[in-house]
Amino acid sequence: MTACFPVAHPLPSLWLEGNPFEDYRSTPELPTHADIVVVGTGLSGSSTVLELSKTPNLSVLVLEARGASSGATGRNGGHLTPLSFRDYRLDCQLHGQAYALAVRDFEMQNYQELRTLIDTEDIQCHFQNDSGNVQLYCDVDAYQEALEDLRVWKADGGNAAGVQVLDAEKAKQMSPLAVGAIRIPASQLTPPVFCWHILQQALRNPKINLQTHTPVTGIDPVNHSETCGPWTIKTPRGTVTASKVILCTNGWSRHFNLVDIVPVRAQVTAYQNLPEIEQHEHFGFSAHHGAEYMHERAFDHTVVLGGARDKVPGQEIGVWNDAEINPRVAQGLDDYLASHFPRMCQRSSSLLLPVRKRWTGIMGYTASGRPYIGETKNESNVYICAGFK
Ligand SMILES: Cc1cc2nc3c(=O)[nH]c(=O)nc-3n(C[C@H](O)[C@H](O)[C@H](O)COP(=O)(O)OP(=O)(O)OC[C@H]3O[C@@H](n4cnc5c(N)ncnc54)[C@H](O)[C@@H]3O)c2cc1C
């Protein structure tokens, strides 16, 4: 296998069931030329294609190694949670106060725009609109640190509308291990359905051509002396030339040797909750700075839990194969559910909810914690939008 490349047959995730773009090809043959080639069809790739589709007469070829949105977007935890107060002081230290405030405002604006879009276009992505996300703290020091982050963020002018501090008694009603909790504005959804909707919109423009199961193996200048393109894009189905290339390849970007993004494998288990066991409110949970995350889908009572990377040496850093699970992480997730949410599990004879599916997905980490967005080198005409955890 080539280093850091999407594997051909990833594990199926719950979100990818019934993918209408699994084998989609706008034309049977691969076009030989396009103005722009976009690589990847996750949240980054499909949003990029939608924007490009608004420019008349621009030919855009979209190349995806597997089925559409089958990367992290099709296998994540399903949370749409703006940053809010979380890790505010750390961000101030690392990137400065102006950045720490601006990135939170940006995420909140993005959150509101997505809510409006999903609502006005009636996108059927099981949207649990503004249902909230509860940050659970099982350690007094961590809870105090979080309260301090919230206090400082507010004092610096952060918009804390909708943030609610829950006392120990309320937190314990959610998990007996909790010592405190803070609820922040958030929603949950089936993420690839959102991408498929916007891909569908983009494809109304006949100049947009989507080719799934077409991995890009390399990008070379057409004329070897020219470092600003045009570019030859190599695939096992043939080559394409284009003036510009946009890489939306997130966890697999390292393959192109242009920016340093480290693949990190995350893992999720979907359990079947029994509605009669307990009346649940439908909101998300996070703990340990987002290392564990969970929500229950209101419409079918599936509980989706991710995290537990700390249960294995190396924490799955440098792993890019999403065709297999790590059994120790799977055990860690089961243990987490049973210990933190025992009321959900206690009536089951195995003291655990029945497992519907387990899967993994690849994230892209950068040294700064910030994504790469823009041209990879000055005037190269190769752009990247990647490095999202
Ligand atoms: C298990 C897990 C849980 C997560 N939970 C959450 C969550 O709850 N909330 C949240 O906000 N974020 C979450 N994330 C992160 C979130 O999913 C990602 O930040 C987001 O999906 C990234 O979108 P993307 O389009 O940049 O990348 P991806 O969705 O990974 O898309 C990249 C695409 O590029 C394609 N590709 C890569 N290389 C090539 C190539 N050489 N040729 C052709 N195609 C190629 C891939 O096949 C893939 O489809 C989670 C991630 C994982 C893995």
Image (cartoon, rainbow, N blue to C red):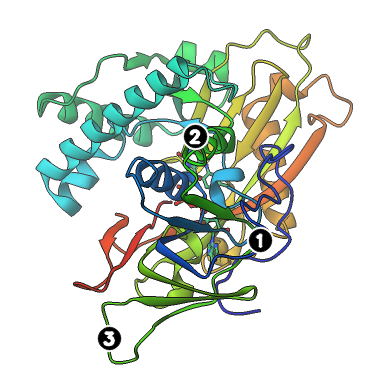
Residue type beneath disc 2: Gln
Q: Is residue 123 above or below residue 100?
A: above
Task: Compare residues 148 and 55 and report the one nearer the observer.
Answer: 55
The quarter of the picture where residue 193 lies is top right
Q: Is residue 60 left or right of residue 195?
A: left
**Disc sitting over residue 226 in the figure:** 3
Residue tagged 1: 213
User: Which residue appears farthest toward the bottom when viewing the image?
Assistant: 225
Task: Compare residues 230 and 159 and report the one nearer the observer.
Answer: 230
Residue type beneath disc 3: Glu
Q: Could one spot residue 154 in this view of the protein?
A: yes
Q: CA distance from mark 3 to mark 1?
A: 29 Å
Q: Earlier in the sequence, mark 1 or mark 2?
A: 2
Mark 2: secondary structure:
helix
Residue tagged 2: 201
Q: From the top left corner, tell me how far across and down residue 241 is, in percent.
A: 44, 73
Label 2 packing within 10 angstroms: few (<14), some (14-19), many (20+): some
Look at 48% across and 17% down and name the residue there.
Answer: 171
